[in-house]
Amino acid sequence: MGWIRSTRNELARIKRHIGGGRFTIELADGGRRQFAREETARLLFMHYMYTLQAIYHEEECPPPPLVFLTIAGASDRERAFYTAFPDGEPLMPYEAEPLIERGEFVARPLAGHELEEAS
């Protein structure tokens, strides 16, 4: 029976270490904000699609999702970015470098006419 308890304790420790599919970003004001990875991925995809739709219809683009606003307001933006996206830059309509370095949202060219203008 003891080996079952120790295995359960070990699994609980691993789950706590991994975060159970969640991650936390420390804010510059000392607060913390927690996000669920799967929900964040879904929201980022939808934000990207809504941004493309706004560009196509020549409308105003939607505001950045909460995870990007949180990264912009983090005490260590680079650490926050790679905590949120450990596998690298996600599908996003912003340049990563200005977000990480200065907390600024700089639109990246996404549509054909924007790409032509950028080159």
Image (tube, rainbow, N blue to C red):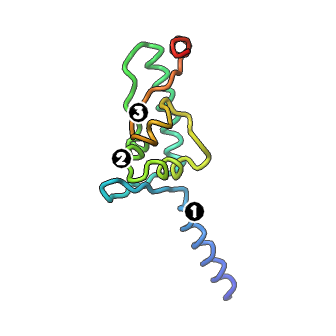
Is residue 102 placed above or below 113 in the rendered structure? below
Q: Give the amino acid at mark 1.
A: Ile
Q: Residues within 10 Å of mark 2 (few under 14, many from 20)?
A: many
Q: Position of residue 69 (x, y in %)?
A: 38, 42
- At x 55%, y 61%, the residue is 20
Q: How far is disc 1 from disc 2 in space, using C-alphas?
A: 24 Å
What residue would you read off at disc 2?
Answer: 73
Relative to 64, say whether 59 is above or below: above
- Looking at the rendering, in which quadrant would you find the C terminus? top right
81, above or below 104, in the image: below
Find disc 3 in the rendering and name its residue. 105
Residue picked out by circle 1: 18
Residue 20 appears left or right of 35: right
Name the residue: 46% across, 25% down.
Answer: 51
Q: Earlier in the sequence, mark 1 or mark 2?
A: 1
Q: Earlier in the sequence, mark 2 or mark 3?
A: 2
Taking 51 as reference, is 32 left or right? left
Q: Residue at x 58, y 73 (%)?
A: 13
Q: Nearer the viewer, residue 70 or 7?
A: 70
